[in-house]
Amino acid sequence: MEHVVVVGAGQAGAALVAKLRAEGYAGRLTLIGEEHAPPYQRPPLSKKYLLGEMELERLYLRPESFYAENGIELLRDTTAVSIDRADRRVIAGGAALPYDALALCTGAVPRRLPGAIGGELPDVHVVRTLADVDAMAPAIRPGARALVVGGGYIGLEAAAVCRTAGMEVTLVEAAPRILGRVAAHETADRIRDLHAARGVTIHEGTGLERLTGDARVTGAVLSDGTEIAADLVIVGIGITPATALAEAAGLEIENGIRADALGRTSDPAIWTAGDCASFPWRGGRIRLESVQNAIDQAEAVARNMLGAEAPYDPTPWFWSDQYDMKLQIAGLNAGYDRVVVRPGATGASASHWYYAGERLLAVDALNAPRDYMVGKRLIEAGRSPDPAALADPATDLKALLAG
C-alpha cells in the first residue's frame, strides 16, 4: 500500500494511524479530522476539563509533534465530503486524495432535541466535542439552574459535574427509570440514591414537553405538567453512528458501518473501527461505544490492514465516574435473567453480577475495583462461578479464579 487514508481524527483514528506506524507501515499516511485540535480524549471533556481541573494540552492523546515526527499528515479543520470508490479517492478540503486503503473512523453524533420543543435555543447543549464543552462552560457556575435531559451515563455524568460546580440540577428521564437500557435496577437504584443524596432532583417516567424562553432558555414544561426553571439545558439522549459518508458511497449499513470480523467493510479496500462500526460478535452483531473499543478495534484493524487476518473478539469494558463513585463494567449484560449482588467492604461499594441461566455475562462494580478485575478475568476465560459463592462476602474472589 502506497497511501492509507484515515477519515476521523478521534480516538479510533488516532490509534489506527499510530498502530500502522508501530507495525512497520512505511507508506504515505493521512489522517483527516474535522476539528481544529489534534486528536484528544473525550471522557475528561465533560468532567475535569469542564470544571477547569485539566488544561487543554493534557487532553491531547499525543503531543502535536508526534504526527509530523512519524510521517503522519494530519489534516485539521477538514471534512471528507465524498468517496470515489471506483477511482479510490476521498474528496476532502477541496482536494482529491487517492488511497490504496481507506479506514472510516467517523465516530458518532449526539442526538439533539427537536427544534419544535425549543432545541434550537442557544442554551441547549450536547456533550461530544471540545467545541460543545467550551460553549457550555460559561454557564457552569454556582447557583445557576441546569436541566439535564436523559438518564443514561452521559446525562448522569453531566448532572454530577453540574452539581459539583454548585448548580441546582434537575434530571428528566422519559423511560420508567434511569439506566433502563444499560443496567439492572440494582445498579440504577444505587446511582439514583447517590444523586439524590447530592441534591439532584430526578424525574423518571417523565418526558420533556417543551422548553420555555425566547432568546434564552428560562425553563421547561414536563409531560406531567410540572414547570421548572432552568438557565442551561444539557441533552444526553444517546448518540447515533456517523454513517452518512459511508452510506453515500454505497457501503453496507447495519446499525453502523457494517464490517466483517477483520474490520473490512463491503468494499475490500475500505475498513472501519470505533463508534461507527458494527461487527460480528459471538453469533450476533454489535456496535460498541467506548474508548476501549475505539482503541482495541482500531489497533486490530491496523494489523489486519497489514495482513494479520486476526478476527476482533473483545471482552467489552466501560466505566463511569460520578462524584466519588467509580462504576466499572465488564462484559455485556444483554439477555440476563438474574442479578447476583455481592456486598462491598464498605457501604459505598458493591458489585452486581449478571447471569443468563448459569452463565456469567457481565459485572457492574461500584467502587469495587477488585470485583471488576476478577469479573473481567472470569468473563474473558468463559468461566461462571457459583452465584451463591459470589453473593457470600466471605468468599475469596481469588479462589474463584483459582478454581
Image (spheres, grey):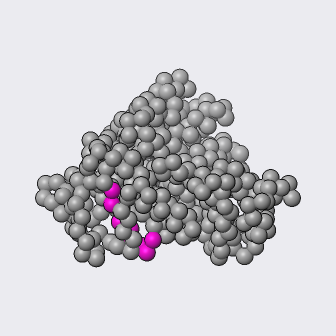
The extreme left residue here reads: 214
Q: Nearer the viewer, residue 278 or 232?
A: 232
* Residue 147, horizontal then vertical, whole percent: 30, 58
Q: Total marks drawn?
A: 0
Quadrant showing the N terminus: top right
Give the vertical position of 240 relative to 334 (above or below): above
Residue 222 drawn above or below residue 311: below
Whole-percent x and y of residue 37?
Answer: 39, 34
Q: Nearer the viewer, residue 188 or 133?
A: 188
Q: Give me the residue at 49% from left, 65% from top.
A: 179
Q: Is residue 244 above or below residue 388?
A: above
Identified at 53% across, 23% down, the residue is 69
**Placement of the C terminus among the 4 image quadrants:** bottom right
Magenta residues, start to end: 169-177
Residue plotted at (29% across, 69% down): 208
Q: Is residue 281 magenta?
A: no
Residue 355 in the image, given as x and y percentages of width and height: 69, 70
Between residues 168 and 352, which one lies in front from this camera angle?
168
Q: Position of residue 136 (x, y in %)?
A: 29, 46
Splitting the image into 4 quarters, where does residue 331 fall? Answer: bottom right
Q: Is residue 159 visible?
A: yes
Q: Residue furthest right?
A: 403
Visible in this render: residue 109? no
User: What residue sits 52% from the left and 39% below the top?
Assistant: 14
Q: Nearer the viewer, residue 335 or 75?
A: 335
